[in-house]
Amino acid sequence: MSDAQPPRILLSQPDVGDLERQYLLAAFDGGWIAPAGPDLARFELGLTELTGWPAVALSSGTAALHLALLSCGVGPGDDVLLPTFTFVASANAVMYTGASPRFIDSDLRSWNMAPELLEKELVALAGRNELPRAVMTVDLYGLCADYDALVPICERYEVPLIEDAAEALGSTTTGRPAGTLGDVGIVSFNGNKIATTSGGGALLAGDDALADRVRYLATQARQPTVHYEHTEVGFNYRLSNLLAAIGSAQLQRLPQMMERRREIHRHYRNGFAQHGVELMPVPAWHRIGNDPLGGWNGWLTCVVFADGAARDAAMRRLEAQNIESRPLWKPMHLQPLFDGAPGQIDGTAESLFARGLCLPSSSALADDDVQRVIATVLAAS
């Protein structure tokens, strides 16, 4: 009898194929190896057509966050309010500017920033004449935050809103694309995202002037002279033309990849029904017509168990079957890096981290792979 393990099932493997290969080789054969080129321009145009906002393609979503913060005037000594329930890149970008993060807990409708806690923090800071320089929201697992509530709060206190939509490319809420729901937004094309350029990101700007400013800063802030002239600090943050070629192909296939991920989510929902495994919420603002998932990109399907022991048992069982899974994000206020950081914490993110698990969700998964995941999780209970 063979002791060979079954094939590895990854959490969110890239879904690339012949079209991406054709675009990449065409760019290579055309000699556009240098960072700038026609594929970079085409990719940015594709993002603008998708979102309706001018786009600047950059080397990572984190680079885009850094420039978004700078575009809002964030600098040393400032405060930025952001969710505690997020990946560290959101908070790291704040630190790059010399500002300090203040963390806000989640609501249970979307797992994103709780509007009532944001308002509570802003009331307290306004009372001390210490309003933050910016608020940063994060659209976790492709789910948009409650912008109908968050935007008016930020407007009331005249604080700019940065939307970290790194995980939410293609998602919409009330007809508006993720990344365009605040004053400035960003998306990511990291290897595990719903659409990838291997590594990369983009800033979505509310107007052409901001896009031009960001593109200038991302190209070492070079002045328009024959020689190299610089009057302020710039950054080497532009996406390469070759990676942009892959991105253009991915954008063409994005609708099909999103629908496949939503289909996988439906398989999980059906498979876990009446088995005590709670699926992530998909807020009502993602509904399109009769489809409650229609405005969600489906990036990752996550589940929550009754307690941490049940979650850990499922994770161990999955790994034993060569299936990758991962706990939900560890809250930033629990990270040693941000020990003692202030904010509004009510325990929601801590509970989700203790009991939650991300399951394989790639659009490249076969139905048999999904059923294997479901059977393995159920066998652990």
Image: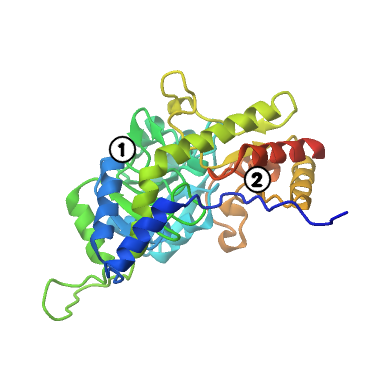
Residue 10 appears anywhere in the view: yes
Residue 131 appears anywhere in the view: no
Rendered position, 126 above or below 293: below
Please state the horizontal and vertical placement of residue 276, each as a whole percent of the image.
Answer: 74, 28
Please state the horizontal and vertical placement of residue 53, each as a whole percent of the image.
Answer: 25, 44
What residue lies at 23% left-to-right and 54% top-to-bottom?
A: 211
Task: Give the spatial CA distance, label 2 vs label 1.
Answer: 31 Å
Q: Give the labeled residue for mark 2.
A: 353
Farthest-out residue, left: 225
Q: Left or right of 318: which side holds 335?
A: left
Disc 2: CA contacts within 10 A as few (<14), some (14-19) or many (>=20): some
User: Which element type, helix, strand or loop, lies under badge 2?
Assistant: helix
What residue lies at 28% left-to-right and 59% top-to-bottom?
A: 40
The answer to which of 62 and 252 lies nearer the viewer is 252
What residue lies at 40% left-to-right and 54% top-to-bottom?
A: 20
Farthest-out residue, right: 1
Q: Left or right of 254: which side holds 342?
A: right
Q: Left or right of 133: which side holds 343?
A: right
The answer to which of 105 and 175 lies nearer the viewer is 175
| Amino acid type for the residue under numbered disc 1 | Glu
Name the image quarter holding residue 380: top right
Q: Give the labeled residue for mark 1.
A: 155
User: Which element type, helix, strand or loop, lies under badge 1?
Assistant: helix
Of the image marks 2 and 1, the number of the one nearer the N terminus = 1
Name the image quarter holding residue 123: top left
Quarter of the figure with the C terminus: top right
Disc 1: CA contacts within 10 A as few (<14), some (14-19) or many (>=20): few
Rendered position, 273 above or below 219: above
Please state the horizontal and vertical placement of residue 250, each as a whole percent of the image.
Answer: 40, 49
Quarter of the figure with the N terminus: bottom right
- Closer to the eye: label 2 or 1: 2
